[in-house]
Amino acid sequence: MPSFLDARDLRLLITAGVVMLVLLGLTYVISPPPPAQQALGYPSSYSSNWAGAKAAFVLLRELGYRVERWEQSPENLPFDSKGSVLVIVEPFESATPAERTAIRRFVLGGGRVLAAGASAAKIVPDADATEVPDFTLQAKTYRARLPSPYTRDAPEITMVAADAWTSSAHPWLALYGHDDQIGAVSYQVGKGEVIWWASPSPLENGSIRDTGNMAFFLDSIGAAADSHVFWDEYYHGARGSLGSYIAGTPLAWAGVQIALGFVAVLLTFSRRFGPIRAPATESRLSPLEFVETLGDLYRSAHASPAAVAVAYRRFRFALSRQISIPATQKLPDVCHAAAVRFGWKEAPLLDTLARSERAMRNISLDDREALDLVRHLHDYSSSLEPAGGAEPEMPAWR
């Protein structure tokens, strides 16, 4: 019984299979790894491990706060932000200018932003903080620097301060400090306020129960009756749309593999069962055949000087006929007459003709130089034969 696939179809399918295996390997190698957890971790409201923030999120919900995870762009935050709180803790994705503008609008309208870490300072309005390369993981006690609504229930807190506050364009208050280290600050922006923490550790699952941490966290959020809390997960990689979710998975690579398999099947079928057409052959009477043959002859014989000589003599003959001077006239006289007659520039014309005469006698003439001279001579020759009997014009390249 004859085989369903001939040898060529079998080779095509084998090639497609090898390509799919290579793509699978590339998917495994270059697919982005999950965000690497640092020593302090990223306090996601979904995480119940030591460095997560699920306990703080659940605490707000059980205390009656209107709290929701925000997996959309900040551009979709409500315009009426009075009484709203946006929590951004240790984001590991950067914000676009439009997103930072949206957060500024949120604060200017009366909203409050609780930001933790130097990466959050890059997103909120007018904050400047730096990462400390060498810091200890041991929690330290930070004491309140002055009485305020945020420190009244927590005279001291514990914090693993990994980042350092630098400055702000607005007057700011240091809420907590340890020696010369600032643990938390607050400042006004329009009708709203920004509260920055050097570390998210006071709200993490493993340390929220430490002395003063829970009270400080709740004071930073505000009263339950007045607050609508948006807990950011957008900058932790969570996206609220199906398309953005798929973009972060290997499904796009799987789609490429399926498409390649489909193309392989389509080519196999069309090549086997498609209509048979004779290959197109170029007519030997084509006008370009003579030109190509002549060009090949010049190239194989290294006859660049001859090509320049042909173009040069053709132009000298046409020029002498137009300006009515002998073909043996000296070059300066010929160029001067052409400049007077046609308005050409005398110096470029003399340079082209002089170079052409030298090239005609140069047996080691470079092909590129010969081509450049032939093009210039051709342009001059073409300008001597304008359409409709008009006066010859200067070549465009001059």
Image (spheres, rainbow, N blue to C red):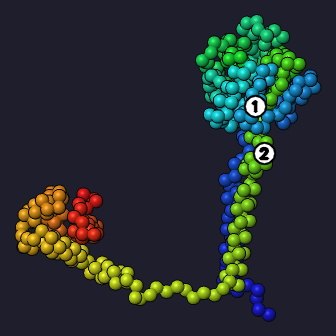
- Tell me where residue 199 sits by quadrant: top right
- Secondary structure, mark 1, is loop
Q: Position of residue 210 (x, y in %)?
A: 84, 19
Vertical side of 169 occupied by 120: above or below: below
Q: Is residue 203 left or right of residue 121?
A: right
Counting from the top left corner in percent of width and height, residue 70 is at 79, 34
Residue 231, image x, y percentages: 80, 30
For mark 2, does the 10 Å Cα neighbourhood hold few (<14), some (14 to 19), or many (20 or more) residues?
Answer: few
Which image quarter: residue 212? top right
| Nearest the eye: 379 or 40 | 379
- How far apart, in angstroms, are the residues tagged by discs 1 and 2? 16 Å
Residue 77: assigned label: 1
* Residue at screen point 69% across, 26% down: 105
| Pointers 1 and 2 in contact (C-beta within 8 Å) | no
Task: Using residue 346 as the reference point, say whether residue 258 is left or right of it.
Answer: right
Q: Nearer the viewer, residue 133 or 188?
A: 188
**Image position of 174 with respect to 136: above or below:** above
| Residue at (75, 31) in percent of width and height | 77
Q: On the image, numbered disc 2 is attached to which residue? A: 241
Please, which residue is most extreme toward the bottom here? 1
Q: Total number of numbered labels? A: 2
Q: Residue at x 76, y 88 (%)?
A: 3
Q: Amino acid at mark 2?
A: Ser
SS state under label 2: loop
- Estimate the x, y position of residue 374 in percent, counting from the top left: 25, 70
Q: Of tags 1 and 2, which is closer to the observer?
A: 1
Note whether 371 is above or below 150 in the view shown: below
Name the quadrant containing residue 207: top right
Packing grade of label 1 (10 A; few <14, some 14-19, many >=20) is: some
Residue at 69% x, 73% y is: 264
Name the disc covering residue 210, or none.
Answer: none
